[in-house]
Structure formats: C-alpha cells, structure tokens
Image: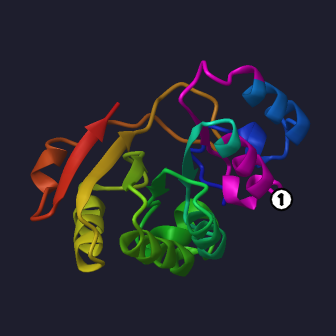
C-alpha cells in the first residue's frame, strides 16, 4: 500500500532497515525491562523473518502486538495458530469504493478476510481508521461503522486524526477534525477518537 498519509514513508520506500540480528540483539538486551513489543509498518506481515522474530520475542517473554492493514490474512491466520501474537490493531483504510484511491491497492477483500478471521479468533483486537478530512468524510465514517456492524465486529472503533505538519508519503493539505464523531456509535460499536 502507498497511503498518502503514511507516517513511515522511509519504511514504505525501503529505507531504514534493521537486520534480524540487530532486532534480536535489541530484544535480548531489553529482556525483563519491557513487557511487550509492537510490530508495525509499512506492513509487518510482509517481512520474511516475522515468524522467527516473533518466536524469539515470545521466547524472551514479551507480549506481542501487531499493527496490520489486513492485506495478508493467511499470514495473520498462521501467526494466530502458532500463538505468536497477543493483540492486533487492524487498520480499516476505507470502504471498497474508496479503497484504491486511498491505499493505491486492490486489497479490500483481504482486509475483509482478516476482519472475519479476527472476529472468529480468541485474539483481542481493535479496528482503527486514520482520518484526513480531505480523504474520509463523516458520511464515509458512518458507512464504515455500519460495514463493521454488518460484519459482526463488536468493540471500540478508533478514529485517529491525521497529524498535520509531519513527513508523510504523499502531498496533503491541512486536515481538520470532524465534529461529534462519538455520535456515530451504534449498538455494539463505540466510536472513540484518538489524537
């Protein structure tokens, strides 16, 4: 994906790499000091060494959270089956009709499969959306809440407001916060704002 508002442009563009050896060395040095680790992205499930890295993190006693766009449900399913993750933050980028415009990908079916998988699993998870006012409207968010409800999601739906003035992958104007997003809550889904 190449979301315009991505806060990790260096990672998406293939820069800022750390070897698995360095990552393991860092985790080993933090044993007993940290409770958990978070793998984010870009998309962490694309990394070829995610399984050995998470196996080592679990062996060191860390809890593991992953931030994912849901584009690799098969990897997510294997991570769950092997007991390698304790919590998932699933990014809901947009509804199908706006998905390509925002992500530059056609991966909406994979997102939907990941949502269904997480709904069936015992792994705690959240769904969240980063909102730039030029890309996602209040009406879009209302439709997204109903999509989640129709797909049996129950819990908090986190709206993360775009942070103006930080380096991102694309060119965007200034974002303004939508008003009264808490009014979007429906039975079983509480809309919660972050940032």
Give the left or right position of residue 152, taking residue 160 as reference: left
Give the left or right position of residue 137, taking residue 174 as reference: left
Q: Position of residue 189 (x, y in %)?
A: 19, 60
Picture quarter with the N terminus: bottom right
Instruction: Tell me which residue sits at (60%, 18%) in the image.
Output: 33
Q: Which residue is mark 1?
A: 48
Q: Secondary structure at mark 1?
A: loop
Quarter occupied by residue 71: bottom right
Give the left or right position of residue 163, taking residue 62 as reference: left
Instruction: Tell me which residue sits at (80%, 34%) in the image.
Output: 23
Give, as a single range, the part of the protein colored magenta. 29-57
Whether the magenta-drawn stretch holds residue 47 is answered as yes
Could you say which is closer to the camera, residue 27 or residue 126?
27
Quarter occupied by residue 168: top right
Note whether residue 49 is visible.
yes
Note whether residue 177 is visible.
no
Give the left or right position of residue 119, taking residue 33 as reference: left
Q: Position of residue 50 (x, y in %)?
A: 75, 54
Query: Badge 1 local density, few (<14 within 10 Å), some, or many (20+)?
Result: few
Whether the magenta-drawn stretch holds residue 49 is answered as yes
Picture quarter with the C terminus: top left
Q: Position of residue 133 (x, y in %)?
A: 37, 46
């Amino acid at each position: 994906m190449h979301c315009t508002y991505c806060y990790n442009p260096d990672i998406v563009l293939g820069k800022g790499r750390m070897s698995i050896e360095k990552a393991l060395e860092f985790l080993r040095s933090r044993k007993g000091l940290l409770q958990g680790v978070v793998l984010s992205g870009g998309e962490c499930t694309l990394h070829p060494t995610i399984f050995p890295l998470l196996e080592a993190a679990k062996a060191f006693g860390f809890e593991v959270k992953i931030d994912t766009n849901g584009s690799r449900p098969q990897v997510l399913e294997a991570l769950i089956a092997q007991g390698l993750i304790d919590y998932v933050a699933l990014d809901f980028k947009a509804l199908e009709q706006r998905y390509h415009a925002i992500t530059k990908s056609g991966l909406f079916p994979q997102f939907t499969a990941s949502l269904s998988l997480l709904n069936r699993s015992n792994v705690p998870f959240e769904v969240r959306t980063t909102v730039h006012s030029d890309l996602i409207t209040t009406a879009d968010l209302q439709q997204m809440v109903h999509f989640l409800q129709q797909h049996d999601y129950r819990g908090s739906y986190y709206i993360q407001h775009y942070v103006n003035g930080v380096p991102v992958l694309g060119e965007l104007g200034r974002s303004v916060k939508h008003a009264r997003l808490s009014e979007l809550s429906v039975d079983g889904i509480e809309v919660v704002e972050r940032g």
